[in-house]
Image (spheres, coloured by chain):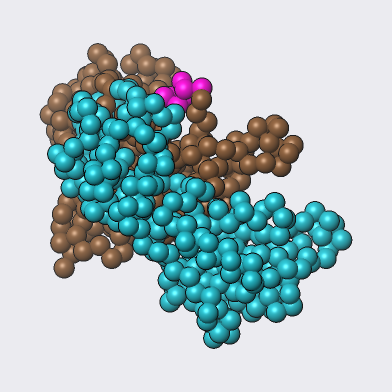
Chain colours: A cyan, B brown
Amino acid sequence: MSDVWYKELGFETNPFSIKPNSLVIGIDSTLQKLKSRIKTGGIILLTGDYGTGKTAILKNLIEEFKGKRKLIYYSYNRKDGILDFDKLLYESKMLNKIIKRKPKKMILLLDEVEKLNIKEREELILNYKQGYFKAVVLVARNKKSANLNTELEELISKDYVQMQEMTSETAAKMIRNRIGSVDYISDVMIKRIFQVRKNPRMFLENCEDVCRYAFNTNSEKVNEKHLEILNTSSINHTIGPWLRW
Amino acid sequence: MNWYNKLGFSKDPFEINPFVLDTKFLKYDAELEELVYFLKSSAGVILEGPDGSGKSSTLKEVIKILQADKKEKYILINGKELSLNQNIEIKILQKRTALQKVLGLKPKNIILVLDNADYLTNENFERIKYYYDEEIIKSFVFATANYHRLLMSESLKKRIGRRIIRLRKPSSKDAIIIVKTRMDKKLILEDRTILKVWEYSKHNIKMHLVNIASLLKNMVENDKDEILDEELDELFKDNFYREKDLSKTCQICGLKLHETKGSWHCDKCEHTCPECGVSIGKNDKICGNCGVDFK
């Protein structure tokens, strides 16, 4: 296998990995807004398109609040049957699990709430009104897809937080934060790549493809010409199957 | 003694499961390199290709490379072997170390190699997404005949992005080479005969291999060194492969499969192109394989 570009540039792992990173750059004002609303209490709806950093925000909130043992995180994509809020509360603390008592004033982060059903919505509101949840952050792609009922909509009417759009300045800052002072790619080129696709996840993917292409074509630095790789819609290779048998 | 023993083989040289028969890669190829790069770089990737295009063989080579790299931990799952209600988390958690089991921890940075992803439920795809975000899964590859048919959410597709590696459909030249390669120097079939079997097999490489094996078995059992066209036509009236597969049932719903243009499909769970028989998406307007416009 040929040399991997990022290792040659001194990175142990891919610096443009699209995995949600707990280090948030460019979405810090949304994060601050959420933190202050969680402290005040209430039901908050966080919305944002795919790849805009919702999961990264949640990871940061987990880091912030987990030490106080007051936080429950649940992602709906793991749901197996109906979500049992009582069980979630019991299992949040060892002692409560043993004595079967629900702790009060917990913070609940509920990711991918699109699949929340009627019964679950009712249970959630009930637990919130009884004080078991001090703050609830519901995460969805948009307000419509969150599939809320009237009561939930009323409860979150003021606490609606939308992911902010990234600017080219914050995009460059995000990449700098990942690659440090490595000058293989300049801020100007980072901003040029950002102009192609502004969605943070797609932007990272594009940065990786451009740097890899530049490296594999033995270029000393990323330049305008390397952006041509972004015109391909997929990595579409063909190979003779006889090579495999 | 089996027919292949009589020809000097210890195993059936036309075994269609690359994980059973140790077939060889003759050359290191670009797709494999690309795939290994993505898996080591924490990406999610699709390996797409029609039946018999070499997806399982490619995965097998990926496994060999991962095995050689002591830093990487991987798990190979065959989607066909997961029942409809089985939670894929249970399989992934089997990769926990003894210490992780004792401490109730989850494994970290596992590379998931998933063959026959077509059989996975939406719930299991969502679990994979969650594990990927949580860094329990470092990277993944889903091998499928048709990416657009997978029951995965838009958000998982966005995580895959452009990382789609496509393998092409085998040609008639490939059909001859694969038979010659597998038979080594013991070949008793002419190219013309192999091509005829290829036609009978509706250009499906797996069916081709089974039919060639059945033909050779018939020749060995009847002490024949060659086969005439008329004899071949007669034999293929009772297509060997189809006979074998008539008892096949869908792994998802349990219904009996039917044959469309040389491939086996489930009417309830699958949509197939009426022209070439490959699996297609429910809302596809054009066949991704042969290009037929369904309108």
| Rendering coords of residue B30 (x, y %) | 26, 29
Q: Which residues are the magenta region? A: B64-70
Q: Quick check: B231 left or right of B62? A: left
Q: Answer left or right for B85 relative to B184.
A: right
> Which percent across, then down, holds residue B178?
24, 27
- The picture quadrant where one finds residue B38 is top left
In this rendered view, identify the residue nearer to me: B169 or B165.
Answer: B165
Q: Main secondary structure of the magenta part?
A: helix
Name the quarter where the N terminus of chain B is drawn.
Answer: top left
- Residue nearest the viewer, comparing A236 with A15: A15
Q: Nearer the viewer, residue B44 or A244?
A: B44
Residue B190 within the magenta-colored segment of the rendering: no
Residue at the spot 36% in from the left edge and 34% down from the top edge? A181
Is A104 left or right of B222, judged from the image as shown?
right
Point out the residue furthest to the right here. Answer: A99
Residue B161, visible in the rendered structure: no
Q: Measuring 43% from the left and 64% from the top, which residue is drawn there? A: A163
Q: Please, is residue A109 above or below residue B40 in the view?
A: below
| Residue B274 shows in the view | yes
In the rendered image, the quadrant that contains the C terminus of chain B is bottom left
On the image, the x and y values in percent for residue B224 come to 24, 21
Where B251 falls versus A104 (above or below)? above
